[in-house]
Amino acid sequence: MDLTTAQLARLDEVSAIDPGQPHALLVGDHIGNVMRGGMKIQASR
């Protein structure tokens, strides 16, 4: 079966998984600022 680019894009759109709560809340800027106390955290190498 061959799908067009538009069909593949539509399939990706309708099959996307919504992580829901609490993930949506925890990735928000407000919660991140509260958890880090305004500190900037750099990834270690």
Image (spheres, grey):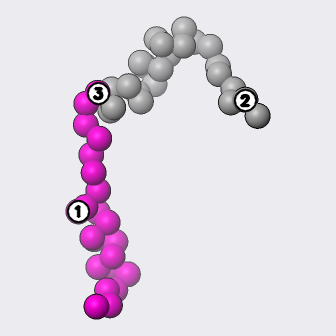
Q: Earlier in the sequence, mark 2 or mark 3?
A: 3
Q: What label sits on residue 22 in the rendered view?
A: 3
Assess whether residue 2 is covered by the magenta stretch: yes
The picture quadrant where one finds residue 37 is top right
Residue most toward the right? 45
Q: Is mark 1 on a helix, strand or loop?
A: helix
The picture quadrant where one finds residue 28 is top left
- From the image, tell me which residue sits under label 1: 14
Q: Please give the range of residues in magenta.
A: 1-22
Residue type at tag 2: Ser
Q: Which of marks 3 and 1 is nearer the N terminus?
A: 1
Q: What element carries label 2?
A: loop
Residue most toward the top? 37
Quarter in which the C terminus is drawn: top right
- From the image, tell me which residue sits under label 2: 44
Task: Please rate how many residues cluster around mark 2, counting C-alpha atoms within 10 Å: few if below 14, some from 14 to 19, many from 20.
Answer: few
Residue most toward the bottom? 1
Residue type at tag 3: Pro
Distance of label 2 from label 3 (alpha carbons): 27 Å
Distance of label 3 from label 1 (alpha carbons): 22 Å
Q: Tag count in the figure? A: 3
